[in-house]
Amino acid sequence: MTNAIEITDLSYRKNTKTILHDVNLQIVQGRVVGLLGENGAGKTTLMRLMADVAKGAKGTIAINQETDGTKRRGLISFTESLRGFRPGSKLSQIRDVYATVYPDFSAQKYIDLTTFLQIDDDLELNKLSRGTREKFIIALTLSRQAAVYLLDEPFNGIDSMSRKRIISSIIKWKADDATMLISDHYVTEIAALLDEVVIIKDHTVCTHKSSEEIRSQFGIGVEDFYESVYGGDIHDDEL
Ligand SMILES: Nc1ncnc2c1ncn2[C@@H]1O[C@H](COP(=O)(O)OP(=O)(O)OP(=O)(O)O)[C@@H](O)[C@H]1O
C-alpha cells in the first residue's frame, strides 16, 4: 500500500510558542480521514504546513513521496479562504482564475459540483451568505483532480441539508485513489464517511486509528471515541 501522506518528526513553533510537536503520521492512498481536535489544537496549522502555505517547520512532509514544497502544492487541493479575491469578483471569474492556476482543474467537475450544491456562479463573492461561500470553496476544492484533498472545517456555517449535500458530493466525486483529510471539532455527520480518525491533542497526534479498529477495540463509534479521548475516559496508554 502506498502512503499518500508521510509526516516525520514534524515540529512547528510560532513566536516561541509550540504549535505542533513531534508529529508522525502516515496515511495510505485512497483513505478518507477525519482530523479531529478542539479549537486551537493545530489542525489548520498542520494542513497549512502540508500544503506549503505555512513554512519553517522542522521535520519532513511527503505527499506521494514528494517533499519539495512547490511540488507538494501541486498535488494538494486545499480549501482556501478566498480572501485574496476582490469582494466584487463574480464566482465565475474566480473559477477562471482556478482553471488558469491549477492544471488539474476540471471544468466539468466544477459544473457538476456547483449544480449539485445549488450555487449560482453569476453572483458576486460579497453577495454570498457564509454558508454559500463555504459551499463554493468546497466546489472549487473538489473540482481539482488532486492526489490529496485537505478540507479544513468544511461544514462551518453550513445548514444540515447542505452538509448532507456536501457529504454526498464528497462520496460521489472522490476518485478511488484520492486521499482526503477533513478537519472538524465534531464528527456526527461525517462519521459514516471516515475510514480513519486522527486526533490532535497536546500539540501532537494523540491517536490514529481506523473506524473499524475503534469499533472492534472499544465497541464504540468514531464520535464517542473522540469524546472519550478528549474527555479522558480513554487514557493515552489504552490507545
Ligand atoms: N500565525 C500565527 N501566529 C501565532 N500563533 C498562531 C498562528 N496561527 C495559529 N496560531 C496558534 O496555533 C495554535 C493552533 O491553531 P490552529 O488554527 O492550527 O488550530 P485549529 O485546530 O485549526 O483550531 P480551530 O479548530 O479553532 O480552527 C493556536 O494556539 C493558535 O493560536
Image: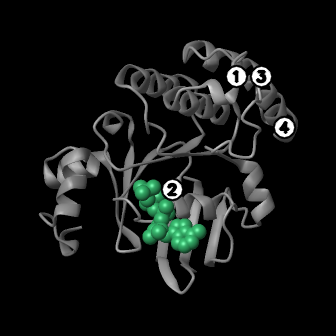
Q: Residue at x 64, y 36 (%)?
A: 141
Viewer-proximal residue among 47 and 80: 80
Alpha carbon distance from label 3 to label 1: 10 Å
Q: Which mark is residue 110?
A: 1
Residue type, numbered disc 4? Pro
Of circles 2 and 1, the one toward us is 1
Badge 3 vs badge 4, beta-carbon distance below 8 Å: no
- Residue indicated by mark 4: 103
Q: Residue at x 54, y 64 (%)?
A: 45
- Residue indicated by mark 3: 92
Badge 3 vs badge 1, beta-carbon distance below 8 Å: no
Q: Position of residue 17 (x, y in %)?
A: 49, 82
Label 2 vs 1, first from the N-terminus:
2
Category of crowding for the residue at label 2, using alpha-carbon neighbours closer than 10 angstroms: few (below 14), some (14–19), many (at least 20): many
Q: Name, please, the residue furthest toward the bottom.
A: 16
- Residue indicated by mark 2: 27
Q: Is residue 114 left or right of residue 232?
A: right
- Per the image, label 2 sits on a secondary structure element best described as strand
Residue type, numbered disc 3? Ser
- Per the image, label 1 sits on a secondary structure element best described as helix
Q: Residue at x 61, y 12 (%)?
A: 115
Viewer-proximal residue among 161 and 187: 161
Of circles 4 and 2, the one toward us is 4
Alpha carbon distance from label 3 to label 4: 17 Å
Label 3 vs 1, first from the N-terminus:
3
Identify whether 16 is placed above or below 179: below
Label 3 vs 4, first from the N-terminus:
3
Residue 169 visible in the shown view:
yes
Category of crowding for the residue at label 3, using alpha-carbon neighbours closer than 10 angstroms: few (below 14), some (14–19), many (at least 20): some
Q: Quadrant of residue 39?
A: bottom left
Viewer-proximal residue among 123 and 61: 123
